Image (spheres, helix red, strand yellow):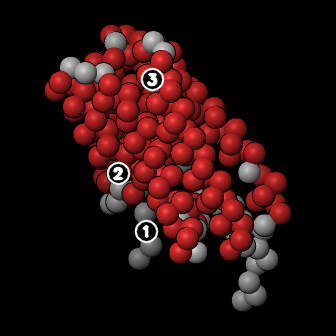
């Protein structure tokens, strides 16, 4: 029996749906409403994944846990600092995990992206890509801290919704030369 195949719209909905809901709620009624909407949207997309596929992806599950804790603290204590720290915590965790595997020759980006990659990479390619993404996530954690601590909330929300996405896509595209250079030869069957 084969695993259920995900509809093409499901992954983008899981990845970006809560962000869209957060932004719309922020524009309509501010940060506290947006935080509550983010928590609800995150639970909804994970429930959707579980109902449709019988499983929940690990990274969105980790992010949901952090959203629940930091969003919950934001609402409970009426302190927006907690939701503003959430991207820092998520990015820092990704950085620590990715960079932490490298001294043990474990490019941990491979198990995360391996099936999503359109072509296989050499071991060296995975190591370099893991290092680059680990450093990128560390830099993004620092950048989020800088933005939320020095800028007005409106600017931070725009950075969270658009800035992080654009920087991440630009960084991913900048990795194309490495992906092409470190492409592994297909193994003979």
| Mark 1 or mark 2, whichever is nearer to me | 2
Separation of disc 1 and disc 3 at Cα?
42 Å
Q: Is residue 48 visible?
A: no
**Residue at image x 30%, y 52%?**
51
Badge 3 or badge 2: first in the primary sequence: 2
Q: Residue 152 has which mark? A: none
The image quarter in which residue 148 lies: top left
Local secondary structure at mark 2: helix
Q: Any mark on residue 3, and which?
A: 1
Secondary structure under badge 1? loop
Task: Name the residue tied to disc 3.
Answer: 148
Q: Which quadrant is the N terminus positioned in?
A: bottom left
Q: Residue at x 26, y 39 (%)?
A: 68
Crowding around mark 3 (Cα neighbors within 10 Å: few <14, some 14 to 19, many 20+) is many
Helix, strand or loop at label 3? It is: helix
x%, y% of residue 78? 21, 20
Horizontal relation, residue 104 to residue 54: left or right: right
- Quarter occupied by residue 84: top left
| Nearest to N terminus: mark 1 or mark 3 | 1
Q: Who's the residue at 55% across and 46% down the image? A: 137
- Judging by the rendered image, the residue that carries numbered circle 2 is 61
As measured in the structure, the alpha-carbon distance from the residue carrying label 1 to the one carrying label 2 is 20 Å
Query: Residue 122 appears at what percent x and percent y?
Result: 72, 73
Which of the two residues, 125 or 24, is positioned nearer the viewer here? 125
On screen, residue 126 versus residue 69, left or right, reads right
Q: CA distance from mark 3 to mark 2?
A: 24 Å
């Amino acid at each position: 029996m084969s695993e259920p195949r995900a509809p093409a719209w499901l992954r983008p909905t899981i990845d970006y749906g809560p962000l869209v809901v957060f932004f719309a709620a922020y524009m309509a009624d501010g940060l506290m409403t947006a935080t509550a909407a983010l928590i609800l949207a995150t639970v909804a997309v994970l429930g959707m994944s579980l109902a449709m596929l019988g499983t929940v992806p690990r990274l969105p599950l980790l992010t949901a846990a952090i959203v629940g804790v930091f969003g919950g603290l934001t609402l409970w204590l009426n302190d927006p600092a907690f939701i503003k720290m959430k991207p820092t915590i998520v990015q820092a965790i990704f950085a620590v995990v990715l960079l932490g595997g490298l001294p043990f020759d474990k490019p941990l980006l491979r198990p995360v992206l391996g099936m999503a990659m359109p072509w296989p990479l050499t071991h060296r390619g995975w190591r370099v890509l893991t290092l680059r993404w680990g450093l990128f996530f560390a830099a993004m954690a620092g950048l989020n801290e800088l933005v939320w601590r020095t800028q007005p909330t409106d600017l931070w929300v725009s950075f969270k919704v658009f800035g992080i996405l654009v920087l991440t896509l630009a960084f991913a595209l900048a990795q194309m030369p490495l992906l092409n250079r470190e492409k592994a030869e297909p193994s003979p069957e």
